[in-house]
C-alpha cells in the first residue's frame, strides 16, 4: 500500500473479529517497523510485550481495563503492551561513538569521540537522565515514534489497530516488566469486525488551527492543490457523515453479534 | 413488575437513550422484565440501583462511581444469570441488558463480550 494511503486508512478499530487469528509474521513486521524508528542516542527506548488474547486470562484482561479501554480488549486477538525504557542513557557513549565511526554522526557537524566523552555525555545525557521529568518526556516522545510506525505497519499489513490506555499496575504483575520501564499504551491488533474505514475519517480541524509559519499566530496557509492531491492519493478521505444512521446501524449489528449492551 | 418500573426516572432515561420504546413490544417487555427481575433479586428499585453505584466524596460532595459497587453488580449479574438458567450468548446478552440500563444512567460498567 502506498504510504499516504496507509496514513489515510488508519482508524482506531474498536470492534475486532475475535475469531480470526493474526499471523505472527505480521506482528513481526510491526515490531520491525518500530525497531526502524528514529531514536535519540540510538537507544532502544521502545519496549513491547506481545500477548495473544488467550495467553491472558479473563481475570487479567479485567485487571488491565480502564474506563476507556473496555470490551475492545476482549475482542482484539493481540495486545501489544508498549513501555518506554528510562535506562536509555546506559551505553549511550558507546552507541554514539559507533555512529561517529560509521559516519552517521559526521565530524562536519562537530562529532568526535572526544565530543561524546567530554560534552555530550557529561553535559547533556547524564544530567538529563537524572531529571525525571526530562527523562519521561524523552522516553515518551521516542517511544511514541516507534509505536506510530508499528501502528502504520499494521495497517499496511491489512490489520486493524487501536491505541489505548491500560491499567499498568494490573499488567505489571503478569508481564513482569522491570521497574525502569514506564508504561505507555497498549496497541490492540486484529482484523476489523467493523468497516475497516470505520465509517469515514474522524473529524479533524484545518491545518491552520494547529500549525504556523514563522511564529505562533501566523497560521499555515493550505495550498489547495496539495489538499486535492492528498485526497486523490488517499491521505485525506471522506469524513464520517453527520448523518450517522449507517454507522449506528453497523454498531447495532455488531452489538447483536457480540451480545454487547446498547 | 416490568410495567411497574417504567415510571422510574432512570428507566425513562434508559428508554430514551437506547430507543427502547421503538423496539417491538415483545422486545421492550423482555428487556424491562430482565431489569425488573434483577432489581427484585437485589431488592432495589432501578433508581436506587443507579444511586447505589454513585457515591459522593465526604470532603467535597463530588460524585464518583464506586468501583467496588460496580464489581458487586457484576457479581450479582453472574449469580442472576445462573439462577435464571441462562448460558452461552443468552447469559451475556441478558446480563448486558442490565449493564445497558446502568450505562445510559451514567454508570460506566463494562459489558461482557460473546465471542462465540
Image (spheres, coloured by chain):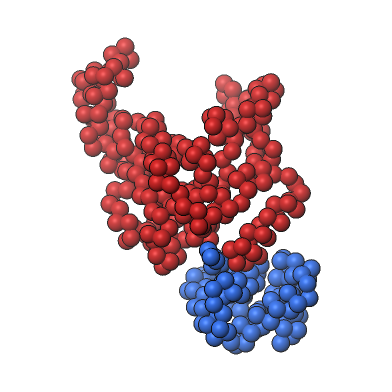
Instruction: Give the position of the N terminus of chain B as an image quadrant.
Output: bottom right
Position of A68 with respect to A198 (left or right) is left
Position of B31 with respect to A213 (left or right) is right
Above or below, comparing residue B32 to residue A47 in the picture = below
| The quadrant where residue B25 appears | bottom right
Q: Out of B40 and A115, give the one closest to the viewer.
A: B40
Instruction: Provide residue A138's location: percent of width, then percent of height.
Output: 38, 37
| The quadrant where residue A11 appears | top right
Query: In the rendered picture, chain B carries what hue?
Result: blue
**Across the whole image, how many numbered discs are drawn on residues?**
0
Residue at (62, 43) in percent of width and height: A197
Q: Out of B10 and A137, give the one closest to the viewer.
A: B10
Q: Out of A161 and B66, give the one closest to the viewer.
A: A161
Above or below, comparing residue A19 to residue A241 in the picture = below
Query: In the rendered picture, chain A carries what hue?
Result: red
Instruction: Provide residue B32's location: percent of width, then percent of height.
Output: 70, 79
Instruction: Provide residue A52's location: percent of width, then percent of height.
Output: 40, 55
Above or below, comparing residue A177 to residue A102 in the picture = below
Q: Out of B66 and A145, give the one closest to the viewer.
A: A145
**Is residue A83 visible from the viewing direction of this image?**
no
- The outermost residue toward the top is A108
Residue at (66, 43) in percent of width and height: A200
Residue at (75, 66) in percent of width and height: B19
**Is residue A99 visible from the viewing direction of this image?**
yes
Amino acid at each position: 500500500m502506498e504510504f499516504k494511503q496507509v496514513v489515510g486508512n488508519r482508524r482506531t478499530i474498536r470492534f475486532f473479529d475475535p475469531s480470526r487469528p493474526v499471523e505472527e509474521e505480521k506482528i513481526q513486521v510491526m515490531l520491525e517497523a518500530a525497531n526502524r524508528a528514529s531514536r535519540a542516542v540510538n537507544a532502544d527506548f521502545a519496549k513491547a510485550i506481545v500477548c495473544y488474547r488467550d495467553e491472558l486470562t479473563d481475570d487479567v484482561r479485567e485487571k488491565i481495563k480502564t474506563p476507556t479501554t473496555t470490551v475492545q480488549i476482549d475482542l482484539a486477538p493481540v495486545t501489544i503492551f508498549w513501555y518506554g525504557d528510562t535506562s536509555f542513557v546506559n551505553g549511550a557513549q558507546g552507541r554514539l561513538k559507533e555512529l561517529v565511526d560509521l559516519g552517521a554522526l559526521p565530524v562536519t557537524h562537530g562529532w568526535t569521540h572526544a565530543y561524546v566523552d567530554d560534552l555530550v555525555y557529561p553535559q547533556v545525557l547524564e544530567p538529563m537522565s537524572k531529571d525525571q521529568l526530562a527523562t519521561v518526556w524523552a522516553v515518551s516522545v521516542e517511544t511514541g515514534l516507534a509505536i506510530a510506525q508499528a501502528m502504520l505497519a499494521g495497517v499496511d499489513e491489512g490489520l486493524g489497530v487501536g491505541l489505548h490506555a491500560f491499567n499498568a499496575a494490573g499488567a505489571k504483575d503478569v508481564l513482569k516488566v522491570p521497574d525502569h520501564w514506564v508504561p505507555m499504551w497498549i496497541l490492540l491488533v486484529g482484523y476489523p469486525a467493523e468497516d475497516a474505514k470505520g465509517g469515514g475519517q474522524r473529524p479533524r480541524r484545518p491545518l491552520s488551527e494547529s500549525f504556523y509559519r514563522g511564529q505562533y499566530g501566523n497560521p499555515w496557509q493550505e495550498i489547495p492543490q496539495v489538499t486535492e492531491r492528498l485526497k486523490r492519493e488517499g491521505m485525506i478521505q471522506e469524513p464520517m457523515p453527520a448523518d450517522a444512521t449507517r454507522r449506528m446501524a453497523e454498531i447495532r449489528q455488531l452489538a447483536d453479534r457480540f451480545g454487547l449492551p446498547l | 413488575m416490568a410495567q411497574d418500573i417504567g415510571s422510574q426516572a432512570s428507566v425513562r432515561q434508559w428508554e430514551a437513550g437506547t430507543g427502547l420504546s421503538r423496539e417491538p413490544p415483545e422486545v421492550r417487555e423482555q428487556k424491562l422484565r430482565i431489569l425488573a427481575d434483577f432489581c427484585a433479586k437485589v431488592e432495589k428499585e432501578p433508581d436506587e440501583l443507579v444511586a447505589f453505584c454513585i457515591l459522593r466524596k465526604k470532603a467535597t460532595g463530588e460524585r464518583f462511581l464506586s468501583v467496588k459497587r460496580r464489581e458487586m453488580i457484576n457479581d450479582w449479574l453472574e449469580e442472576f444469570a445462573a439462577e435464571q438458567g441462562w448460558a452461552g450468548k443468552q447469559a451475556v446478552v441478558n446480563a448486558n441488558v442490565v449493564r445497558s440500563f446502568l450505562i445510559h444512567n451514567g454508570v460506566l460498567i463494562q459489558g461482557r463480550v460473546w465471542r462465540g
